[in-house]
């Protein structure tokens, strides 16, 4: 069962905006993968990689998308302090919207607690707008 990370996506309005920002950063750095820099290194990084975990993004209080994690890089910030670069596949996978409270940094997310991919949803549920799905879920109707 994969182990994942979850992180707030600050300053991003929706999945399309996240995709645009990451594409611009990849082009500027001339990389084929996206990278998110964080201060703390996950102690369970090897477990995340061997189990093919993902980074789940919380956008405006709702888990909306995940990105497969493809590696971790040891980096330094502008002041020479060690940081962790989370290497992410450029692929963004929409998930069933799920409300999530604000928190600082990143957290581990067990696969059993992660929302399923939206494309695996049954019937016409995949056609419902993400905002409406999130509202229905917050009301306990889904």
Image (cartoon, helix red, strand yellow):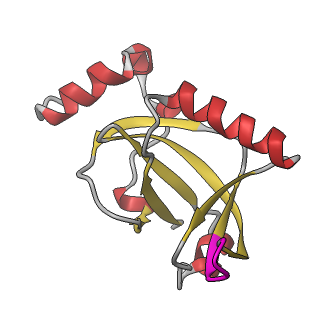
Q: Nearer the viewer, residue 84 or 70?
A: 84
Residue at image location 38% in from the left, 60% down from the top: 112
The residue furthest right is: 30
Q: Is residue 70 above or below residue 39?
A: above
Find residue 1 and report its horizontal and vertical position in percent.
51, 67
| Snapshot quadrant of residue 22 | top right
Is residue 42 toward the left or the right of residue 116 in the image?
Answer: right
| Snapshot quadrant of residue 136 | top left
Q: Which segment did they paint magenta? A: 78-84
Q: Is residue 14 above or below residue 105?
A: above
Is residue 135 toward the left or the right of residue 24 in the image?
Answer: left
Find residue 50 and report its horizontal and vertical position in percent.
67, 74
Q: Is residue 34 above or below residue 39?
A: above
Q: Is residue 83 magenta?
A: yes
Count all numbered tags in the image, as a single digit. Answer: 0
Residue at image location 46% in from the left, 35% down from the top: 12
Residue at image location 44% in from the left, 56% down from the top: 7
Q: Nearer the viewer, residue 63 or 86?
A: 86
Q: Nearer the viewer, residue 50 or 107?
A: 107
Is residue 30 toward the left or the right of residue 53 in the image?
Answer: right
Q: Is residue 19 magenta?
A: no
Residue at image location 52% in from the left, 30% down from the top: 15
Looking at the rendered image, the quarter that the C terminus falls into is top left
Is residue 141 toward the left or the right of residue 19 in the image?
Answer: left
Find residue 96 and report its horizontal and vertical position in percent.
39, 35
The residue furthest front is: 79
Find residue 14 and report its horizontal and vertical position in percent.
46, 28
């Amino acid at each position: 069962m994969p182990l994942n990370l979850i992180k707030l996506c600050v300053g991003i309005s929706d999945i399309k905006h996240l995709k645009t920002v990451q594409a611009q950063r990849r082009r500027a750095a001339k990389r084929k993968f996206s990278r998110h820099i964080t201060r703390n290194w996950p102690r369970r990084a090897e477990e995340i990689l061997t189990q093919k975990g993902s980074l789940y993004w919380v956008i405006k209080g709702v888990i909306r998308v995940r990105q497969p994690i493809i590696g971790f890089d040891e980096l330094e910030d502008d002041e020479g302090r060690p940081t962790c670069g989370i290497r992410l596949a450029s692929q963004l996978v929409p998930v069933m919207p799920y409300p999530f409270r604000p928190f600082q940094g990143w957290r581990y997310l067990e696969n059993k607690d992660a929302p399923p991919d939206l494309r695996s949803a049954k019937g016409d549920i995949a056609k419902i707008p993400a905002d409406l799905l999130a509202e229905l879920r917050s009301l306990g109707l889904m």
